Image: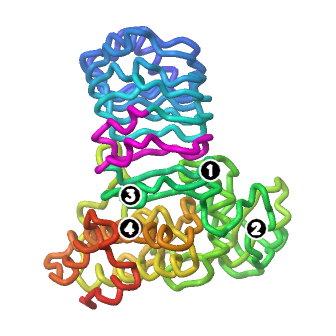
Amino acid sequence: MRPDALHALRRGDLAGARSLRLAGLGLTEFPAEILGLADTLELLDLSGNALAALPPSFGRLRRLRVFFGSGNRFGRLPPVLGDCLALSQLGCRGSALAEVPAEALPPALRWLTLTDNHLASLPAALGERPALQKLMLSGNRLDRLPEGLAGAGRLELLRIAANRFATLPPWVGALPSLAWLAMAGNPCEGPGKDPREDPGAVPAATPVAWSDLVPGALLGEGASGRVHAAAWDGRPVALKLFKGAMTSDGLPEREMAACLAAGGHPNLIGALGRLTGHPEALQGLVMPLLPVAWRVLAGPPSLESCSRDVYDPALRLDAEVALRLARGIGAAAAHLHGRGLLHGDLYAHNVLWDGTAGAAVLSDLGAAACLPSGALGERLQRIEVRAWGLLLGELLDRCAAAPAAARAMEAACVQPEVAARPLLAEALAMLPAA
């Protein structure tokens, strides 16, 4: 993407650089000049190249905190990554990985992304990384996780969609900090079926012919697809066209199935119909078009915040508005639970609101999954209760004076004992009006 950066590196112009991005350059060999930045370099992005290995001296990058190596040809996660004692974020998505050596996992590991590889197992050492907070493993061949992860007290986000789990590890439902779980596309998922194996498993929906649509401006783009403004027989709508590629949350077709299975709710962006007849055979959904003034409640997590959303520092809320927001999003998630669905990504960055009065809708079902029945399904609901409790707390933090009863509810929802948390319907019933 930036050949000029590579030229500048080789000329020696980047002395003292803290960040270096050499993505998409087709590199087949590691530029040795990078090691000359050992005293300052904190972020290195080598994504989208054709590297098969990293040099034995890679550990000289003693200040390196973030490494992106996605889209290379490693095959095996480079063991030298573990020599970087400050390295806390590691991303090697789609790098044909079939093995993760224990020595490749740096001791300060906080955020690990190994989505869309060929991994059938992971080393026990993964459970020996006490700072681990975010673990993204969707799109592999895993049927188990290291037992040591049962003690991962700081793990908040776990993505294991589109793997081979016949049963969910029993300790997952007891992790004290876990709030966001993606597990669709595994044999252990609830009664919903996998649309890859049974196309008829996608719920029926009103067919919307491509010829009846007039696509308009691009409204937004995410990992799973692009959303356009459109007109359907003269009616303003939103059109989501799915890319069809594996995302960190899982498979786009699972998102489409969840949108259709979710049904209607005033605080949930639902589907009006399913696209048919696209000239490039793309799959898509027609959805309601929100008012133009509506906005995203917060930005997604940053490299620094890891698993927590980033709010506009100027955002201030009246307590009544904050509680209306929390109540609406909680009602949407409770509706999903009642339909046998787990949202999996209940975050402020997936909330759209009016920016004033607190009217809001929950969006993005890319991480949604069918809930298993019985006690396990209820336990997974209580995991999502923690996500809602964190959102409630973030909203209350932006109020000049937060009601004590609302703070008490927040505490009940985020407490480390999963079984002691209320279900969402119970929490909403006890949430004060303002």
CA distance separating discs 2 and 4: 33 Å
| Snapshot quadrant of residue 339 | bottom right
Whether label 2 touches label 4, CB < 8 Å? no
Say which residue label 1 marks.
162
Disc number lying in front (2 or 3): 2
Crowding at mark 4 (Cα within 10 Å: few <14, some 14-19, many 20+): many
CA distance separating discs 4 and 1: 29 Å
* Front-lying residue, 146 or 232: 146
Which residue appears at 57% of the width and 52% of the height? 161
| Residue 297: mark in rendering | 4
Q: Is residue 231 above or below residue 34?
A: below
For label 1, the SS is loop
Say if residue 63 shows up in the picture: yes
Figure colour scheme: rainbow
Disc number lying in front (4 or 1): 1
Which tag, 2 or 1, sits closer to the chain's start?
1
Whether label 2 touches label 1, CB < 8 Å? no
- Which amino acid does the dot numbered 4 rest on? Leu
In the figure, is residue 314 to the left or right of 251? left
Residue 147 on the magenta span: yes
In the figure, is residue 109 to the left or right of 96? left
Task: Give the magenta range.
Answer: 124-153
Expressed as whole percent of the image width and height from the top left, the position of residue 45 reads 44, 28
Which residue appears at 68% of the width and 52% of the height? 243
Q: Quadrant of the C terminus?
A: bottom left
- Which amino acid does the dot numbered 2 rest on? Ala
| Residue 201: mark in rendering | 2
Expressed as whole percent of the image width and height from the top left, the position of residue 349 reads 42, 62
For label 4, the SS is loop
Say which residue label 3 marks.
299
For label 2, the SS is helix
Whether label 3 touches label 1, CB < 8 Å? no
